[in-house]
Image (cartoon, grey):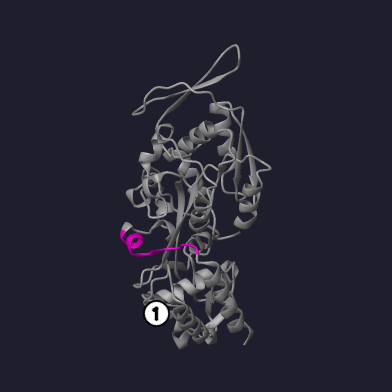
Amino acid sequence: MKWVRLTSLFLISILIISACGNSEKEETFSGNSDTGEKELADKLNIFNWADVIPQEVLNEFEEEFGVEVVYSTYSSEQEMMAKIKSGTVPYDVVFPSTGTFIIMKEQGLLQELDMENIPNFENLSEIWTDRPDDPGDKYSIPVAYGTNGIIYNTEKIKEKPTSWEDLWDPKYKGHVLVSDDPQELFGMALQSLGYDIGNPTEEQVKEAAKKIEDLVPNVLAFDPNPEPQFMSEQAWIGYTVCAGASVAHIQGFEKLDCVLPKEGGLKWHTSAVIPNTSKEKYTAEVFLNWYLRPEISLEMVKSFPYPSPNEEAAKLYTDEMKKLPSLSTTDEDLKKAAPTQPYSSETMELMNHLLQEIRSK
């Protein structure tokens, strides 16, 4: 199971009235929204990671709104971007990560949202609205978020780690697990050195590479899927997505915890957006509003333990859910964590080259 993926989402009652005769569909929003009548499409094309939205939840949308959901999946965001640009299929809703969203927005691949059709946007925590990557909330609905921090085995390590520097402690030689993703790894190293991870200079990247090289004697593996290494207890401590500890808990291995270091840690989010190729913008917005109902967002968190930006959904977490490391992140933690963002092609090329050199030694 991949550790980096999911989506969460919304509330407000929506009443659908099926039109007669010409089979047009009408929607009436109740609550704080004005009543309006607009036509819903017969079909909605969703493009997302596999296993993020449970089929039974999609069935609920189809039954309530009379709209068929065609759910297609991608295995990488590069694949998703290529298909969006090709325009072969007019996808109506896709779910990019922070960095990919920024690129899509800059390249003009997205439509602006009509928030009158998404009243449940008010369910989102203020931390996730009017963000630097989307001022004014024009293009995106955050549906899930996560943090990258220090995962550790609470039986092997009795004293809770507090700093990235703990990964360099010689007593953990051969038991440290780290991501093999250059952007994530250099982000951690840059932050450990006190640098802004958003726009590092070439010299700072090279200094971070030296820092990563100094970590190598402690490293058990550079692993994109570290769950087995932690559950076999070969890995005691590492840098990865905090949801990984929650996945282990769900699978019965409850020895893992995750903390954000005093340097801040990293945070990221997944958003729902409407590509400019969509021909069913209104129906897509109805889907997003439904997605933001608290009980629907809760189902997404149950599907995979990434926390929801929907604060009304978070109020519905069960006591068992609240014990999961990834769902116990506080607002204070999030304010201190640095947001991930895309690096320039030149910076990424340098990071890739330096990491290859380190791993080849």
Q: Secondary structure at mark 1?
A: loop
Quarter of the rendering containing residue 56: top right
Q: Position of residue 55 (x, y in %)?
A: 60, 40
- Which amino acid lies under the numbered mark 1 shown in the image of this protein? Leu
* Of the pair 43 and 62, the residue shown nearer to us: 43
Magenta-tinted stretch: 332-342
Please provide percent x and percent y for residue 233: 55, 74
Is residue 273 part of the magenta span, yes or no?
A: no
Residue 72 vs 102, above or below: the answer is above
Q: Quadrant of the C terminus?
A: bottom right
Q: Residue furthest left?
A: 332
Residue 265 placement (x, y as % from top left) = 40, 68
The foreground one among 148 and 325 is 148
Q: Which residue is mark 1?
A: 193
Question: Which residue: 39% across, 25% down?
Answer: 30
The residue most toward the top is 21
